[in-house]
Image: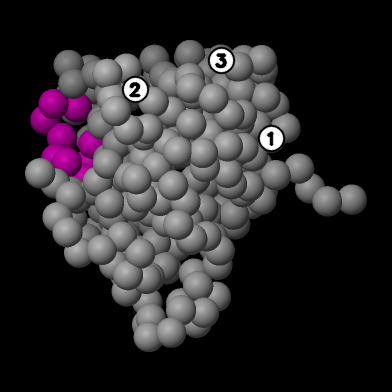
Amino acid sequence: MPHQPAIEINNLVKIYKGSDEPALNGISLAVPENEIFGLLGPNGAGKTTTIKILCGILSPTSGSVKVSGYEMGRNGDNIKQIIGVAPQDIALYPSLTARENLYFIGSMYGLKGKHLKERIDGCLSVFGLEKFGNRLIRNYSGGMKRRVNLIAGILHQPRILFLDEPTVGIDVQSRTVIIEYLKKLNEDGMTIIYTSHYMEEAEQLCSLIAVIDEGKILIHGKPSELISGMPGSQNLESIFLHLTGRNLRDQ
């Protein structure tokens, strides 16, 4: 009997108030369980909008979403129990220490006592932050903040993890630690939905990818098959540029 897809998106549309163009224009996708799925696209392509809808932060204009078989909008509480989120913006209180942030976030997921302490201690150790747990977040480097931001999303050991640009703007060492741990989480059974601008990183990390631009899915599949199936393409970056063009998107 086939497994239930981790994510099912059907004809998803999102039009922001006051906008002439849809941020998402009828996208449909299915992500199997236990994959690392990369949603790749230039600035403004619709990546973050998609992630926010999948997490229940935004409501779509039309279309439907299921997360582990639960229908978004009807089973929101069930979905919240099985997902973790590390947003693009650092979602931590700068005036609290890392431990204080993680105790607060862990308690929101129902963790407490010895189990919560052990989870925090273990995660801080894995990410090389055990000596800095009592330092205020405002005094952390960018890479350290990213690592705590990720810990906040995995503290309750979710079934599905959403990551929006988890390695943007950090040094090679922090990126390596994060990527290696994401691989381990996936090996242990976690499904990961991941957005990024880093094509080489996505090619190494993701078992499946989709390229989105102007709110539409342009291509999806296994990176190796997509590269071999497009004449003249040697890597994901060449496919990405072929599909989305070379015009600057940060204006």
Answer with left or right where residue 144 lies relative to residue 22: left
Q: CA distance from mark 3 to mark 2?
A: 34 Å
Compare marks 2 and 1 and give the one earlier in the sequence: 2
Label 3 sits on what residue type? Gly
At mark 2, the secondary structure is loop
At mark 3, the secondary structure is loop
In the picture of the structure, the residue carrying the numbered disc 3 is 110
Compare marks 3 and 2 and give the one earlier in the sequence: 2
Q: CA distance from mark 3 to mark 1?
A: 21 Å
Quadrant location of residue 177?
bottom left
Query: Could you say which disc has been placed on residue 16 in the image?
Result: 2
Q: Return the residue nearer the eye: 180 or 29.
A: 29
Residue at the image position 48 percent from the left and 14 percent from the top: 107
Residue at the image position 44 percent from the left and 62 percent from the top: 205
Label 2 sits on what residue type? Tyr
As drawn, 150 above or below 222:
above
Q: CA distance from mark 2 to mark 1?
A: 27 Å
Q: Magenta residues, as a range?
A: 137-145
Answer with left or right where residue 80 lies relative to residue 152: right
In the picture of the structure, the residue carrying the numbered disc 1 is 68
Residue at the image position 42 percent from the left and 68 percent from the top: 204
Q: Return the residue nearer the eye: 125 or 11.
A: 11
Q: Residue furthest bottom?
A: 232
Q: Position of residue 68 (x, y in %)?
A: 69, 35
